[in-house]
Image (tube, grey):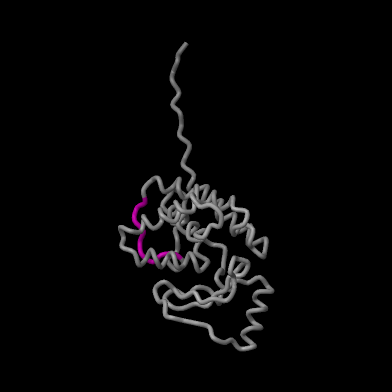
Amino acid sequence: MIGHAGFGHVRGSAALSTEWGRPGGGLRLRPSAKARPALTVTAMSVAGARILAQLHEEGICMGTWGTGPFDNDAAADFADALDDAEPEEREALIRGVLTRTVNATGWLIEEQEAVAAAALVAAQCPGGDLVDTADGPEEPMPVFSDDLRELADKALARIMSDETGSASNWVDPENGKQWQAGLNRLRAVLAPPERSIPLFDVGP
């Protein structure tokens, strides 16, 4: 599934989104964590219903608008939560979502948040790409503990091994390949460097 650029998450305001192909999928309102007014859908015009039906038929999910780590509502909400947290609490939020994903059994309910968290950890590793504040958190991240690097890699490995997760839910196979390639790039950066074993000079 891939989202439409014009219907994605709007930072700081309410955004209408749909999630098709997931348990309980359907029309729902997902307001930003920074502004969550009480919104309900009581009626929909015939034209609006036809538009949503066409989006569904074409495999478009308004909650996902790209293949990057923060190109979906769940990751954008996670970025909002990090921004709202105190600076000393941000590493704990990232550690928590990564740990729960590694230890999860069954449906990975924080899959997208874990990918976003892993991208933030990778950004602090040699060769890692910086996360654009237009997509990810606007507030600076603390210098993460070294062990988060391996934890993030394990979380991505868990996600990529999930046969019922995002890896298999993309309507356009090319988008799925781009998403998997992005995770592979993150894992290549996160993978701890191989330790060289010193050789002893045994002499003749």
Q: What stretch is highlighted in magenta?
A: 136-144
Q: Does the magenta stretch include residue 18?
A: no
Q: Is residue 115 toward the left or the right of residue 176 in the image? A: left
The structure residue drawn at horizontal position 47% and vertical position 56%, both measured from the top left corner, is 119
The structure residue drawn at horizontal position 44% and vertical position 51%, both measured from the top left corner, is 99
Q: Nearer the viewer, residue 127 or 83?
A: 83
Q: Which of 202 and 13 is in front in this view?
A: 13
Name the chief secondary structure element in magenta.
loop
Image quadrant where residue 123 sits: bottom left
Q: Given the current orientation, which residue lies at the most extreme top position?
A: 204
- Residue 93, above or below 62: above
The structure residue drawn at horizontal position 47% and vertical position 81%, both measured from the top left corner, is 39
Q: In which quarter of the image is the N terminus?
A: bottom right
> How far across and down, in percent of the image, does residue 197 sit?
45, 28
Total residue callouts: 0
- Residue 149, above or below 54: above
> How far across and down, in percent of the image, does residue 198 sit?
44, 26
> How far across and down, in percent of the image, does residue 142 sit?
34, 56
Q: Does the magenta stretch include residue 140?
A: yes
The structure residue drawn at horizontal position 54% and vertical position 50%, both measured from the top left corner, is 158
Q: Is residue 57 toward the left or the right of residue 85 in the image? A: right
> How far across and down, in percent of the image, does residue 52 sit?
63, 79
